[in-house]
Amino acid sequence: MSCDEYRGMLDPYLDESLEEEPRRDFRRHLRECASCRQWAVASEPSLFFALAGQGKADPARVEACAEAVTAGIRQARLARRMEGRRRPWLAAAAALVVVVGGGLTWRMTHGGGEALPAPEMEARTEAAARSAPPTVEVDMTGQDVRVYQFATDEDADTAVYFVVNPAMEL
Amino acid sequence: MPKEKLCVLLGGAGNQDGAAMNDRDWVQSAREGDEEAFAQLVRRHSGGLHRAVARILADDAEAWDIVQMAFMRAWQRLDRYDPRYSFATWLYRIGTNLAIDLLRSRGSRERAHKAGTEHRLRLVGKGEGANARVDSLEADGILRQLVEVLTPQQRSAFVLREMEGLETAEVAEVLGCTATTVRNHIFQARKALRQELKRRFPEYLPVSERG
């Protein structure tokens, strides 16, 4: 096709009546022919944008994007795995609440304070009264969950450790 | 039609016929959990998607955020992707929708951003004239100032077809509308850009129209 024929395609290009294939040909010609490109942009300034080049993206930025997306995928996978472990975590937490509640009850009834001993308690031996408090140790191997509870007569407080990550320093 | 159901057959955005086969291979591997295969898709398509989104948003940095979000969403929805169709078009659809959502939420922030860059870009364009060789950076710089007069749909249609070279049918798939609607968006966008060029960048008009 001659330049004149291509120039005759400008109006149908602008009024959107040109089919896809001649549209592609028209655009290709304008990119290749400086004379027709100048004429076309002078005739229709908005073609200034349509004929803009396709700048290449910075390779370093592209690689950074790939790394960020990969990191995001790994994070999402980890979150899903942790989500799957939430149920045993909750079970362990519920068990912990029961144990702590039991321990406090035990302290109320065995460990003194202002609690009144029941009549049968008076019959207990001193050794029995000083028996070790309940100690709970839960080690869910493979689930990354450990629960410890320690309470002794020497300690005024009950110590409870709930470790999700066994590598974590207490 | 479901959002991910695309009707554009192989070839995809940017006419990457040769890459379509490889895309399918990478997608298949990614579906099986291969992160590196998906990273290859990112390396292949992030540049083109970024250029399109940056032109739609008129913001280079925000465009990279959108590109990352688009790939993350694509990863999460890989099971919904139909490999008979172009991965690039599917990806452009995700990215363009994210960009349009962002445009709609921008409000006055965008207008303030544009006002701050106008003077510098005017100097870039001054004296070049309509007959100068069209430069990508120059065109992008001016477009950044003018796209605010376009609706998000007009921007997307104009950028994807007129600047990125997608076909009308592909743009229709990306935007989830008909080819006729795409043509109408582009027609209106061109009209608005012409008026705005005349008002703000008369040096790009033919001498007879500068008034």
Image (cartoon, grey):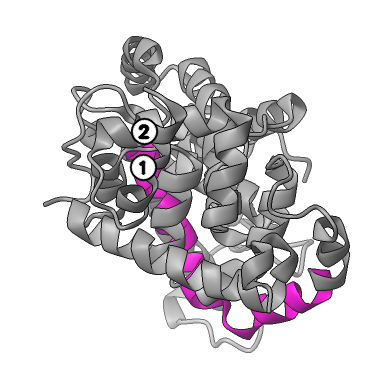
Q: Which residues are magenta?
A: B88-117
Occupied quadrant, residue B197: bottom right
Residue B194, position in %: x, y? Answer: 53, 68
The residue drawn where x is 81% and y is 69% is B117
Q: Please give the label number shown on residue B99.
A: none
Question: What is the number of the mark on residue A8?
Answer: 1
Q: Residue at x 67, y 52 (%)?
A: B140
Q: Are marks 2 and 1 in contact (CB under 8 Å)?
A: yes
Crowd around label 1: few <14 · some 14–19 · many ≥20 (10 Å): few
Residue at 73 percent of width and 39 percent of height: A168
In the image, residue A18 above or below residue A111: above
Percent coordinates x, y for residue A34 in the rendering: 63, 31
Amino acid at circle 1: Gly
Q: Would residue A159 be counted in the magenta stretch? A: no
Q: Secondary structure at mark 1?
A: loop
Most common SS among magenta residues: helix
Q: Say whether residue B100 is magenta.
A: yes
User: What residue type is disc 2 on?
Assistant: Glu
Which residue position is annotated with label 2?
A: A5
Disc 1 is attached to a residue of which chain?
Answer: A
Q: Chain of mark 2?
A: A
Residue at image point 45% right, 63% down: B190
Residues A136 and A146: in front is A146
